[in-house]
Image (cartoon, rainbow, N blue to C red):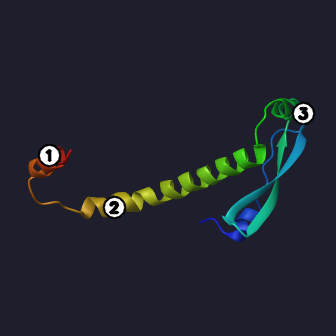
Amino acid sequence: MVTNSSLLAVILMYSNRNTYISFELNIISEFMSEVITLRVSSETKRLMGEIDLNWSEELRSYIETRIKSFRLHKLLPEIYKTASKIRVKGDSTLLIREDRDAR
């Protein structure tokens, strides 16, 4: 589970000969943001400057998407366990016919 304290401890690093790039991370709420530092090579930073892109928003969006993905992945065993207990009784052909007729 992602908590305020775990987000405060997030520092992303890459290689030894790199440049720091800072950006704000708005992930908990609209009213709270934290600053984390990302280390990239000088070449990567130069190439990022050549591209007209809001890197803060791009990285923030990527991190939020990855967190959602990991949280969902963590829930999948429980979802499968619950779904395996559900038994549907009835004729599925009637449901399919009803759906096709509704189109």
Give the side of residue 19 with respect to residue 82, left or right.
right
Location of the N terminus by quadrant is bottom right
Residue 70, quarter of the rendered image? bottom right
Crowd tier of the residue under label 3, counting other residues whose Cα lies within 10 Å: few below 14, some 14–19, many 20 or above: few
Q: Is residue 103 left or right of residue 74?
A: left
Helix, strand or loop status at disc 1: helix
Q: Decide which of tag 3 and tag 2 comes sooner along the chain.
A: 3
Residue at 79% x, 63% y is 34
Residue indicated by mark 2: 81
Q: Which callout, 3 or 2, points to the residue nearer the camera?
A: 3
Amino acid under disc 3: Ser
Residue 27 placed where, x, y %? Answer: 68, 61
* Residue 69 relative to residue 14: left or right: left
**Which residue does the numbered mark 3 point to in the structure image?**
42
Judge whether 91 appears above or below 30 on screen.
above
Between disc 3 and disc 1, whose residue precedes?
3
For mark 1, what is the residue?
Answer: 101
x, y percent for residue 43: 87, 29
- What residue is drawn where x is 38% and y is 60%? 79
- Alpha-carbon span between mark 1 and mark 2: 33 Å
